[in-house]
Structure formats: structure tokens, C-alpha cells
Amino acid sequence: MSDDAYGQLLAASIQHLELLKARGLRHVAVQPQTLAALAAPIAAAARAASPSIRPAPVPAPASRPTQAPISAPVVAAARPPAPVARPVSSPVAAPPPPLAAVLTAPPVSPTPALPKAEAFAALRARALTCIRCPHLASSRRQVVFGVGDINARLMFVGEAPGADEDVQGEPFVGRAGELLTKMIIGMGLTRATVYIGNVLKCRPDTPGQPSGNRKPTTAEMQTCLPYLQEQIDLIQPQVLVALGSTAMEGLVGHPVAISKIRGQWQSYRGIPLMPTFHPAYVLRNQAMAIKRQVWEDLLAAMEHLALPISEKQRNYFLKP
């Protein structure tokens, strides 16, 4: 292999490993033969550059002038012994980290070789062709990647697309989405100035059911979660708002009682996280107290972002 070809191969390998690191991967299984192949050109270059390790010519024995010089033992003695390639064991799956560790884990910086917009476009392209969950890939109409400003200071996280989202390819476009839009406008923002995404990018399949939606499983959410994590790492919002208990479960990896933690600041990948009720829950209850609780959670997010808050906004959903 030429020096140029080897250099290109090495650069491509490093770039691929950096991309895997940006996605959160910490261990890569490598075959011993691969390590030996990568080390061979380096060892050859070292031998060529260092005269001290070149084998000296061995003269033929005087008693046998017609016999060819026996150089193999000398070469073997002059060269340092070849390193023994030790088998690289596959990483052993570690037990799931505690909630505090998951929520406070620092963000992983995106691959520096790509500008933010290009990295986000590449991430979107990978998500749109994802088939990690074959049963979801076969039943979906569209992958619902996310929508909004990739430089947004505020990001909303839901659980999964529903039937309307599956048709339109955009999160929160049904009745719950209309309510979320009103909430965003009430904050003095628009859907174009925030970012909206889901833990799960495909609509959960409903085999045997002509309509309706189902809650995504923990396994489905954990399979899809790296896409959301990379979105968060690229956008780097100043505040995250988790909409509902299922969204929080998808983020932390286990069931969460949203009624117990809503309104209480958390931290996810180093970013302040505000859990609140899902808009669909508000639509089902229609209680003024529930609406006020959700609004108080949004007011807290506005205060953290130093957004202007009028007296009218502070008094939303309070009894006259």
C-alpha cells in the first residue's frame, strides 16, 4: 500500500471514529487482524528509517564457499520480536446509569469537521432512512424528524408521532399540536423560532387497529434516542421542555410520574430541563388548575431565557 493510500485510509478511519464518538459510542470492537494490518505500514516505515534495525549481511562460511549465506536466523535476531496481537474483547454492557447521571451527563460535541447546518442535514438524512425498528419502518408513512430553528434557545420534546404527524411528517400537528402552538404563541414566540422534536421518530404501529395511537415501548424509545440526543447536542438549546411522562421516560430510560416532578427543574446533558404535562392531557382534562400549572412551567422557562413577561401573561388562567 502506498503512503498516500495509507494516509487516506487512516484519515477516513479517524473521521469515522470521531463521528461514532459524537453519537455517544464509547467502545468499538476491532479484530486483531485489523490492528496488525494498520500497524504493518508503520513498522515497515520505522525499519526503513532506522539503520540500526536493518539486518547486517552475513558472509558465507569459509569452509563452504558454494553454500548460500544463511541469513534468516540473523534477521530474526536483529529484528525486535513482532508484537503478539491480543484479541480485543467486545465491551461488556454496563448496567444502566442512575437517573442523576443520565440527566447531568455533559453533551457530546458534534464532529468538528462539519458545519452545524451540514451536520444537522446529515443527521436528518440518516434518520429518514433508519430501519433499526423493522416493525415501525414497515408501517410508517414518514419519519417525523423534527421542525424549527436549529439555533433555537428553547426546545420542546414530545414522545412520538401520532396519525396526523405520520401523514404530514411534522411533530405536533394534530389537536395537541394546535394547543402547543397556542402555548408557544402565548410565550411571545412562534414554531419557527423554537425547535420541536420527539423521542421516537416513527409512529408506533397499531397492528389490527384501524385507528388510534399507542404509547411507544421503552425499547423503541431507547433505540431511537440517539437521534434526539444528537439533535440536542447540535442545537444546544438553553432550555428543554419535556411534554409528558412518556417523553421523560424516553429521556431517562424508566417510568416517571410527571405529576410529581412537573415544574421542578432537571438537567439533561448539561441543559436545564423543565418537565410539564403533555398538551393532550390538558385537552382531556380542561381543568383551569391544570392549564395554570402548565403555564407556570412555561413562565419558568421564559424567566430562565430572560424573555419579557407582561402582567397579562403572568395572569393567564388565574381566577378573576
Image (spheres, helix red, strand yellow):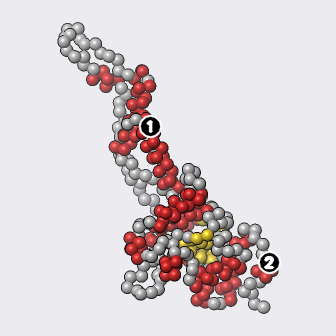
The part of the image, by quadrant, that contains residue 307 is bottom right
What is the number of the mark on residue 4? 1
Q: Nearer the viewer, residue 98 or 75?
A: 75
Query: For the residue labelled by badge 2, is the local secondary structure a helix, a strand or a loop?
Result: loop
Mark 2 Cα within 10 Å, few/some/many (few <14, many 20+)?
few
Direction from residue 126 to residue 232 in the image, left or right: right
| Residue 297 in sight | no
Q: Position of residue 67 (x, y in %)?
A: 19, 14
Bin the neighbour count of mark 1 within 10 Å (Cα to Cα): few under 14, some 14-19, many 20 and up.
Answer: few
Residue 310, disc? 2
Amino acid residing under circle 1: Asp
Q: Residue at left 36%, top 26%?
A: 79
Q: Quadrant of residue 259?
A: bottom right
For label 1, the SS is: helix
* Quadrant occupied by the N terminus: top left
Q: Is residue 143 left or right of residue 84?
A: right
Identify the residue at image location x=43%, y=75%. Answer: 140
- Judging depth in this view, the residue of 98 and 110 nearest the camera is 110
Q: Residue at x 58, y 64 (%)?
A: 232
Q: Is residue 208 above or below residue 47?
A: below
- Residue 262: x and y, percent? 63, 77
Residue 224 horizontal/vertical position (percent): 48, 67
In terms of depth relative to the viewer, which is nearer, 288 or 5?
A: 5
Q: Earlier in the sequence, mark 2 or mark 1?
A: 1
Q: Pointer 2 and pointer 1: residues touching (CB < 8 Å)?
A: no
Q: Position of residue 62 (x, y in %)?
A: 23, 8
Does residue 2 appear in this view? yes
Distance Cα–Cα, label 2 vs label 1:
64 Å
Give the foreground label among 2 and 1.
Answer: 1
Residue found 77% across the figure and 80% down from its top: 314
**Residue type at tag 2:** Ser
